[in-house]
Amino acid sequence: MNVFSRPTPEARGLGMTSQRARDRLIDRLKATGITERRVLDVMRRLPRHLFVEEALASRAYEDTALPIGQAQTISQPWVVARMTEALIERKLPTKVLEIGTGSGYQAAVLAALVATVYTVERIEELLRNARRRFRKLGIENVRSKHDDGKLGWPEHAPFDAIIMTAAGEVIDPVLFEQLAEDGVLIAPVGPAGAQRLLRYRHDGKKWAGESLGDVSFVPLLSGLG
Ligand code: SAH
């Protein structure tokens, strides 16, 4: 289906050398509370070092966010795992919208679990690099566009899940309009230094948010980068 069944020779070679490092990262994620086997299995196989610049590849399996250029970061593995776990907890979504492609790592994790991932990135160079990574890894079920993703991607709605990987002060109500009725939206919300990871689900009357803990994400910005 993708990287995991048909890796390119390049991806295969690099994957081999870093398997031990990935195994250690997975042990750490387990020790720090990640329990969803499907998420751990995907992250055990996905070569995160291909999603960072070569100079940082040796740090790719540390549980830390790393710079990816343009003042942006690839999210910390624990955060990616927690968000993905929270997204698939009740039922595995079919169609997921991600706002903030960045390196493409979170999209690649999701692509191994769901049928189609739609992802939007406002900085063209980052999106170009992410698309190159998807191609290299044989990931074919990610559709991406260069745009301000604040208002979602209405042409492809409804989504079973929406995941935001940049923090806004509020969530625009149009995003809820693009969610399936039994859908889930996960987003970091709040100003720098006081963000919480929120999960919204419909309770029959309204979209209700629950906090999954404190987080630190880059800000959701307007317009194109
Ligand atoms: N999911 C990414 C995390 C990247 S950091 C990963 O796995 O690497 C968040 C990204 O959101 C940045 O690349 C930033 O440019 C992007 N972003 C911020 N505001 C945005 C907006 N309004 N629309 C689309 N992307 C946005």
Image (tube, grey):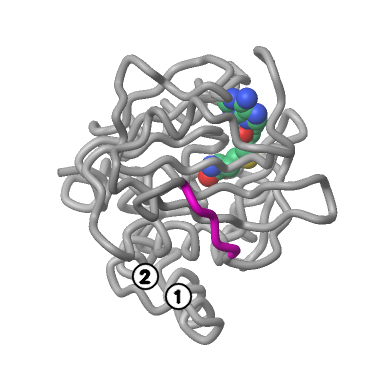
Ligand 1 image position (quadrant): top right
Q: Of all residues shown, which one is farthest toward the front?
A: 205
The reply to whether the C-beta atoms of the residues labelled 2 and 1 are less than 8 Å apart is: yes
Between the residue at mark 2 and the residue at mark 1, the CA separation in whole angstroms equals 6 Å
Whether 157 is drawn above or below 87: the answer is above
What residue is shown at x 48% (from left), y 30% (from top)? 175
- The amino acid at mark 2 is Leu
Q: Is residue 173 above or below residue 148?
A: below
User: Magenta stretch: residue 208 in it?
Assistant: yes
The span picked out in magenta is: 207-211
> 138 or 174: nearer the eye?
174
Q: Position of residue 171 (x, y in %)?
A: 61, 36
Q: Is residue 105 left or right of residue 53?
A: left
Q: Which residue is mark 1?
A: 26
Q: Is residue 155 magenta?
A: no
Where disc 2 sits, the SS reads helix
Does the beta carbon of the residue at mark 1 sit less than 8 Å from ligand 1?
Answer: no
The amino acid on which the numbered mark 1 sits, given as a three-letter code, is: Ile
Q: Which residue is mark 2?
A: 40
* Residue occupying image coordinates x 24% and y 31%: 140
- Label 1: element kind: helix
Nearest to N terminus: mark 2 or mark 1: 1
Query: Which image quarter: residue 62?
Result: bottom right
The image quadrant that residue 225 belongs to is: top right
Q: Residues within 10 Å of mark 1 (few under 14, many from 20)?
A: many
Q: Position of residue 54 (x, y in %)?
A: 61, 44
Q: Main secondary structure of the magenta part?
A: strand
